[in-house]
Image (cartoon, helix red, strand yellow):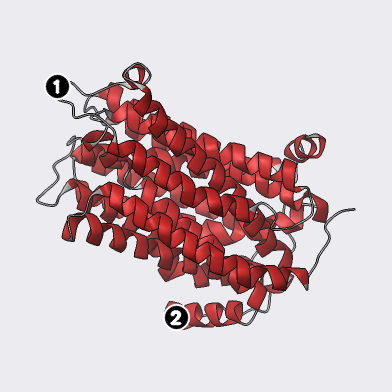
């Protein structure tokens, strides 16, 4: 832990870490608040079903990654990155003002527009935050830096889910409190961004292509020309398909299967986030500081096994009527509820094992001059997989009317097939491209 603590205390890492932390926090406070006002009817839902609106919200948040990532990658490679981060944080404050108008007016579509804009904000921030890590960290600090980024993001998600759920629950329809919350977090994020050190620019002669269709194609074509990198990007993107499929359904799972309230939604998302944080830190501790894939197969196995465990636990939940369960009820209503909570936590830990090494490999093996564009290619493929996840979930749950437990089982089987193929292809390429990041 000595190296990790030292990195977190440095001027080169801490402001970037905090800026990322508060950005992830605000994303999740806002998304959680929106999902809850849709699921529990605090804002008029028009004629669409809760399931359709929840999956539409997930789709709108990640759609900008598909549209704007390639352009964002070019901008992050061409211009000084600390200045870009500050501009993006100002944009976040403006978006939260739009969200405030949506909350105060009770206008669902205005809130969905703000969600799309938050996805756009995250799209332009993504290539910067991951491209900047290899510049501000030493080679043997890269695994630690990624572990801290992932665990910090998990803590931000955890706090965001709790805070978003708590504010909505306690305010009982008074939307001024959630509005003040998201505006305050955006302002704190901007203040943190003011302390990020100025970065060197290596490709000032790069010409920005504003045709995002052409730029996206060229960015993906470049990533595909790097076989190891492209496999790593596919592995990253599968994780986002998998995670989006599960996390988007948690509000509905809580309401329909657990017969529980908004705070239990926050509890389950908290357990998942804590799991990712634990998995991320254990990954660094067990796997070492050298960039490697030792923990990826363990994570892949867990993503399949514990998904079946969750689906099996849901099958034994009792039918309930009457008042919705609260958090304390979850711990006093029988062992089956503990199984659900444990399964969600173990899924998070498996995700931490799986994703941290892949992100470190992406940064370590990407050419420095194209690093932000490699991250942009990663975001585009992530977006494709997450859009596919939203469509997949809508078809299974809303069109075919198949039970959510079956959705989870299908996803588990697909995960086993995909990760087996990935590891078979990845291991020989890693073995022939050994890069030691030890001093």
Q: Where does residue 242 sit, x and y in percent of width and height?
A: 43, 55
Packing grade of label 1 (10 A; few <14, some 14-19, many >=20) is few
The image quarter containing residue 433 is bottom right
User: Which of the two marks, 2 or 1, is nearer to us in this view?
Assistant: 1
Q: Where does residue 343 sit, x and y in percent of width and height?
A: 44, 37
The image quarter containing residue 398 is bottom left
Q: Is residue 192 above or below residue 414?
A: above
**Residue picked out by circle 2:** 211
Q: Where does residue 30 sit, x and y in percent of width and height?
A: 37, 41
Q: Is residue 178 above or below residue 79?
A: above
Q: Secondary structure at mark 1?
A: loop
278 on left or right of 5: left
CA–CA distance between discs 2 and 1? 55 Å
Residue lying farthest right? 439
The image quarter containing residue 232 is bottom right
**Residue picked out by circle 1:** 322
Mark earlier in primary sequence (2, 1): 2
């Amino acid at each position: 832990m000595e190296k990790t603590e030292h990195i977190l205390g440095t001027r080169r890492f801490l402001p970037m870490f905090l800026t990322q932390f508060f950005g992830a926090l605000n994303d999740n406070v806002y998304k959680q608040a929106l999902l809850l006002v849709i699921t529990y009817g605090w804002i008029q839902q028009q004629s669409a079903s809760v399931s359709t609106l929840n999956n539409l919200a997930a789709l709108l948040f990640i759609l900008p990654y598909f549209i704007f990532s390639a352009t964002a990658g070019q901008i992050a490679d061409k211009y000084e990155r600390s200045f870009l981060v500050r501009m993006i944080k100002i944009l976040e404050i403006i978006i939260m003002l739009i969200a405030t108008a949506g909350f105060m007016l009770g206008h669902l579509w205005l809130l969905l527009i703000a969600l799309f804009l938050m996805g756009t904000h995250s799209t332009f921030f993504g290539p910067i935050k991951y491209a900047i890590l290899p510049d501000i960290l030493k080679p043997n600090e890269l695994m630690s830096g990624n572990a801290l980024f992932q665990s910090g993001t998990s803590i931000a998600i955890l706090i965001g889910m709790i805070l978003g759920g708590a504010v909505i629950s306690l305010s009982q329809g008074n939307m001024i409190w959630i509005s003040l919350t998201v505006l305050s977090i955006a302002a704190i994020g901007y203040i943190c961004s003011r302390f990020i050190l100025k970065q060197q620019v290596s490709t000032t002669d790069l010409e920005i292509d504003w045709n995002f269709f052409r730029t996206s194609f060229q960015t993906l074509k470049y990533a595909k020309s790097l076989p190891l990198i492209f496999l790593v990007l596919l592995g990253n993107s599968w994780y986002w398909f998998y995670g989006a499929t599960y996390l988007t359904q948690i509000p509905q799972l809580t309401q329909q299967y657990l017969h529980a309230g908004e705070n239990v939604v926050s509890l389950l998302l908290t357990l998942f986030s804590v799991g990712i944080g634990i998995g991320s830190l254990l990954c660094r501790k067990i796997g070492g500081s050298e960039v490697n894939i030792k923990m990826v197969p363990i994570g892949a196995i867990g993503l399949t096994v514990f998904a079946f465990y969750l689906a099996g636990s849901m099958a034994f939940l009792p039918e309930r009527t009457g008042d919705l369960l609260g958090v304390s009820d979850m711990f006093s209503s029988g062992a089956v509820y503990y199984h659900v909570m444990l399964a969600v936590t173990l899924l998070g830990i498996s995700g931490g094992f799986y994703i941290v090494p892949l992100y470190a490999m992406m940064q370590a093996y990407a050419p420095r001059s194209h690093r932000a564009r490699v991250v942009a290619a990663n975001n585009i493929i992530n977006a494709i997989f997450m859009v596919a996840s939203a469509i997949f979930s809508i078809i299974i749950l809303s069109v075919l009317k198949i039970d959510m437990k079956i959705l989870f089982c299908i996803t588990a089987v697909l995960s086993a097939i995909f990760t087996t193929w990935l590891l078979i292809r990845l291991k020989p390429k890693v073995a022939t491209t050994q890069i030691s990041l030890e001093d």
